[in-house]
Image (cartoon, helix red, strand yellow):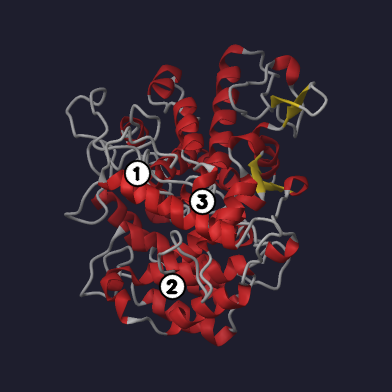
Amino acid sequence: MSYPDDGVHTETSRSQAETEQKITATMATTPPSPPKTLNRSAHASFLGRHLLSLPSAYISLDASRPWLTYWSLHGFDLLGIGLDEEMKRRAIETVFSFQHPTGGFCGGPPPGHQPHLLPTYASVMTLAILCGDHSKKGGGTSEMGRAAWARLDRKGMYEFFMRCKQPDGGFVVCEGGEVDVRGIYCLLVCATLLDMLTPELVEGTATFLKNCQTYEGGFASASFPSSNPSVCPASAEAHGGYTSCAVFSWFLLQPLLRRNEKVQERQASSIDIDAVLRWGVMQQSYAVEGGGFRGRTNKLVDGCYGWWVGGLFAVLDSVVQGEEEAEEAVVAEPDVTATGTFTSGTQIQDGDKDEGKTKGDYVLGDGGEWEEVQGRDMLFNRTALQEYILIAAQSDKGGLRDKPGKSPDLYHTANNLSGLSSAQHLVRHLPSKVRELESHWKPSQCPSWLTERTKETEAESQERRRSIWAHSRGWVEDEESYLAVGGDVNRVNTTSPVFNALLLRVRPMVDFFYGQDAD
């Protein structure tokens, strides 16, 4: 057993030993070479069965109905399977049955359910999947999709968000509910996509997120409330889901944080990127556990963390790159722009700049010479994660699971496939792409109700919206770094970092709401 129990057997050590034995047995009967094939047809059948009819075990998720729809449709998207027009219409109507009259979406039809930040995210992302024109290269907007998006009550949703806002910058997930960084993430995704991200909405949120970071480097669900924002320790241990939600939220805040002219204030609310990077790397399991990720220190490996932790690294790369640019903008000459990207323990200095390349780490090659390798590839073992998902997480009957011995479900199916996508495809957030998009911004009308709240001038509104739009659209796939264990037969589509929907689903939606679509 890899877990050092020092001869003191506990429930944790026994569970670890049992997990290692099951994974080892699975790997022995299905060795990594030749690679196991992704059973697309079985997984598609599993998702299809659950989209139309759920077994009785799902009754406990009655308040999570938008999530069940999102997991099913996102799984289809990753597998490259589309719905016919009638099924799309039916799904759209189902989603809108969850929209609450006072704003936001519920876990089930109102009035039996109240609006909640998490199903609001699931509903918005489901509409992103359903309403694009899938026949257009790179994504587009269909007539049906534009009509559906226009039905979103953005004003009501924004007012719901403000009702959830707390004095310390955090948010309760629903009125009277708990404070949770997952709620912040869900809110920021919706506000970003729907052109509602304002300084008023996120005042104090960066500091709240910083206070959720634990001594390990990862993030807890919340911090202890305090009248002194500088003394608000994290309220629990670091967790993969909370960590990714906190880091994704930090990324989404960057356009507004960079507009903060108070450099010292901006730096004071910064998170410790080096610490969270170290924590994330350390969550990948040993070979005896199959190479998947765990969600907490000394806990069991779980297939869903292939996304929740494996999906972190593209975003960490971007956040550090942005911080380096901000620092150089303060201390460097006006014409100096940082273009290098973050690698483990190594930062590019002015003399090392090379657009589109990263300065990597060094490994000892076969000839005894140190060879430079690209840093992003070294942060986690992409091959091992794919092998875990293909061998340990696939159920023979369809669907994907936590680990051998567990039953498949919609949540683990969608997030295993997202983890597989993040391991196969390297998607980078490029400053050059952001600048290109900013240069193509077409002035568009901000909702009048939002302008009345923000009190911005027209120029200020255009600049804020342009920055957020370009930042959200700055992701570019590095096609040369594509790696699919077992070859293209196991390829899944490219999910977008942060949003966790296909890139070609995110682009049309954000373009539509910011008035940048060409349709």
Q: What's the CA distance linking mark 3 and mark 1?
A: 31 Å
Kindly state the secondary structure of the residue where label 1 is placed: loop
Q: What's the CA distance linking mark 1 and mark 2?
A: 28 Å
Quadrant hosting residue 266: top left
Q: Which mark is residue 69?
A: 2
Residue 39 relative to residue 301: left or right: right
Crowding at dot 1, Cα within 10 Å, few <14 / some 14-19 / many 20+, comes out as some
Kindly state the secondary structure of the residue where label 2 is placed: helix
Which sits earlier in the primary sequence, circle 3 or circle 2? 2
Residue 163 relative to residue 296: left or right: left
Q: Nearer the viewer, residue 339 or 80?
A: 80
Of the residues shown, which amino acid type is indicated by label 1? Leu
Q: List the residue tagged with mark 3.
A: 306
Q: What's the CA distance linking mark 3 and mark 2?
A: 21 Å
Q: Is residue 142 above or below residue 517?
A: below
Of the residues shown, which amino acid type is indicated by label 2? Thr
Q: Where is residue 139? Give x, y as percent.
A: 66, 64
Crowding at dot 3, Cα within 10 Å, few <14 / some 14-19 / many 20+, comes out as many
Q: Residue at left 63%, top 67%?
A: 38
Of the residues shown, which amino acid type is indicated by label 3? Gly
Which sits earlier in the primary sequence, circle 1 or circle 2? 2
Quarter of the image where the C terminus is located: bottom right
Q: Is residue 49 above or below residue 403?
A: below
Quadrant hosting residue 66: bottom left
Q: Where is residue 313? Give x, y as percent.
A: 55, 40
Q: Where is residue 441? Give x, y as percent.
A: 64, 47
Q: Residue at left 65%, top 61%?
A: 493
Q: Are marks 3 and 1 in contact (CB under 8 Å)?
A: no
Q: List the residue tagged with mark 1.
A: 201
